[in-house]
Amino acid sequence: MSILYKAIGRTQPGVAGGGQIKYYAGIKREREVTLREMVREISSRSTVTTADAMAVIENFLELIPKFLRNGRTVNLSQLGSFRVNISSKGYDTPDEVGNYSIKRNKISFLPSAEMRENMGTVRYTKYTELSSTLLSNEPDEE
């Protein structure tokens, strides 16, 4: 299996009228995988029932925000890490910095080295009607 891409035209930023169009490779997004599909797949690969797999994942999804709200980094080993970053207004002295300085927080995900290495082996196929038909008949990679 490979990732489908297509040519996407973009105009030049800051040029009146858009300037010359340049084409870039962009991913042809396919149907997303739902939580229910993931749970069924987990259940079919193991001895747990679909209900048990769903219960574990639901708890998992509740715990990640709990730990993040407490300023903890959530390290998921081979998958990667979630962490909270904040942005704030700058001040001249440390004493001026307070809760009011913080503008917003953002959750960041950093893939593990193993995940990045695994994604380094991805193949790409340019999207055409023919490639879409051929690839839709291939099973997903293990």
Image: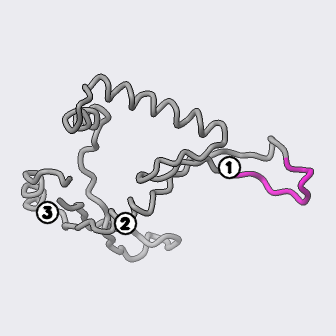
**How far from the left and from the top, in percent, is residue 54?**
33, 27
As shown in the figure, which amino acid type bears the numbered disc 3? Thr
Q: Along the polypeptide, which appears first: circle 3 or circle 2?
A: 2
User: How far is mark 3 from mark 1, CA to CA?
Assistant: 42 Å
Residue sitting at the far bottom: 20
* Total residue callouts: 3
Real-space Cα separation, disc 3 to disc 2, in angstroms: 28 Å
Whether residues under marks 3 and 2 lie with C-beta atoms below 8 angstroms apart, the answer is: no
Residue at screen point 10% across, 54% down: 138
Work out which residue is located at the far top of the displayed protein and give it.
51
Magenta extent: 86-97
Of residues 44 and 83, the one nearer the viewer is 44
Can residue 100 be seen here? The reply is yes
Q: Which image quadrant for residue 3?
A: bottom left
Q: Is residue 25 left or right of residue 94?
A: left
Give the vertical position of 28 relative to 9 (above or below). above
> Quick one: SS at disc 1?
strand
Reading the image, the residue beneath label 3 is 128
- Kind of element beneath mark 3: loop
Say which of 105 and 43 sits in front: 43
Residue type, mark 1 in image: Ile
Mark identifier at residue 117: 2
Q: Secondary structure at mark 2?
A: helix
Among the 4 quarters of the image, the one containing residue 33: top left
The amino acid beneath tag 2 is Glu
Q: What residue is drawn where x is 44% and y is 63%? A: 113
Mark 3, mark 2: which one is toward the viewer?
Answer: 2
Picture coordinates of residue 103 (x, y %)? 71, 46
